[in-house]
């Protein structure tokens, strides 16, 4: 398990950028409470892949796609999803077969997703330390 402490939004952005350089072709499940930095992490991750488009939260769109000449990235937010069928409808499983990186916020909503090999990234707050403190841990789960 890898651990980094973040003391600012910029810190989280930089940590995500570094992780993108190592795990650029995987399913990445982002777990943590509201406001813990999952979307901010996704912005840094996209930057790490060389994607310059503006990355925004897919809370309402469910899935956002980012493409450059060289790179592609999918970013999902399953907060509003209630079943595996709805995830299948997004086309996520086909995308994974093509080995395009997929960032998923709120993967807890669909238990089956957690059975796939993935990079699990956990975000936690510690308000006693600072409102801007986040602990970020990550580990590869599966084959
Ligand atoms: N160290 C930090 N890392 C990340 N975000 C931080 C940090 N300190 C403060 N913040 C603030 O916390 C908020 C994180 O918001 P973000 O949208 O990334 O969270 P989220 O986990 O995606 O939430 P949601 O579950 O609602 O989608 C931002 O407003 C950001 O400025
Ligand atoms: Mg978010």
Image (cartoon, rainbow, N blue to C red):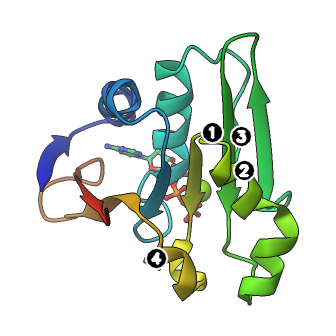
Apparent side of residue 37 relative to residue 102 in the rendered image (left or right): left
The answer to whether the residue labelled 1 contacts the one labelled 2, judged by CB atoms less than 8 Å apart, is yes
Q: Which is more foreground, mark 2 or mark 3?
A: 2
Which secondary structure lies at badge 4? helix
Q: Which residue is mark 1?
A: 100
* Residue that appears at 78% across and 39% down: 65
What is the quadrant of residue 91 in the picture? bottom right
Q: Would you call the spot at circle 1 few (<14 residues within 10 Å), some (14-19), or many (20 or more)?
A: some
**Horizontal relation, residue 98 to residue 67: left or right:** left
> Residue 131: x and y, percent?
29, 54
Mark in front: 4 vs 2: 2
Circle 3 crowding by C-alpha within 10 Å: few under 14, some 14–19, many from 20: few
Q: Residues within 10 Å of mark 2 (few under 14, many from 20)?
A: some
- How much space separates mark 2 and mark 3, taking CA atoms? 20 Å
Separation of residues labelled 4 and 1 (CA atoms): 18 Å
Quadrant the C terminus occupies: bottom left
Residue positioned 52% across, 21% down in the render:
49
**Occupied quadrant, residue 142:** bottom left
Occupied quadrant, residue 84: bottom right
How far separated are the C-alphas under marks 1 and 2?
Answer: 6 Å
The residue carrying mark 4 has its beta carbon less than 8 Å from ligand 1 = no
In the rendered structure, are the residues bearing label 2 and label 3 in contact, judged by CB atoms less than 8 Å apart?
no
Give the mark, 3 or 4, whose residue is nearer the N terminus.
3
Q: Is residue 20 left or right of residue 126?
A: right
- Indicate whether 86 appears above or below 26: below
Q: Which residue has dot 4 on it? A: 114
Q: 5 or 142, which lies in front?
A: 142
**Residue that lies at the very extreme toward the top in this rendered image:** 69
| Mark 3 Cβ and ligand 2 under 8 Å apart | no
Q: Which residue is drawn at the image coordinates 54% and 72% (left, top)?
A: 107
Give the labeled residue for mark 3: 56
């Amino acid at each position: 398990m890898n651990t980094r402490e973040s003391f600012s939004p910029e810190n989280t952005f930089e940590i995500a950028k570094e992780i993108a350089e190592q795990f650029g072709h995987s399913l990445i499940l982002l777990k943590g409470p509201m406001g813990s930095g999952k979307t901010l992490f996704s912005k840094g991750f996209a930057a790490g892949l060389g994607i310059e488009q503006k990355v925004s939260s897919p809370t309402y769109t469910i899935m956002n796609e980012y493409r450059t000449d060289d790179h592609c990235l999918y970013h999902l937010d399953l907060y509003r999803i209630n079943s595996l069928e709805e995830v299948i409808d997004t086309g996520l499983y086909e995308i994974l077969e093509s080995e395009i990186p997929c960032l998923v916020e709120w993967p807890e909503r669909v238990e089956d997703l957690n059975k796939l090999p993935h990079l699990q990234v956990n975000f936690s707050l510690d308000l006693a330390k600072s409102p801007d403190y986040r602990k970020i841990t990550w580990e590869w789960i599966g084959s």
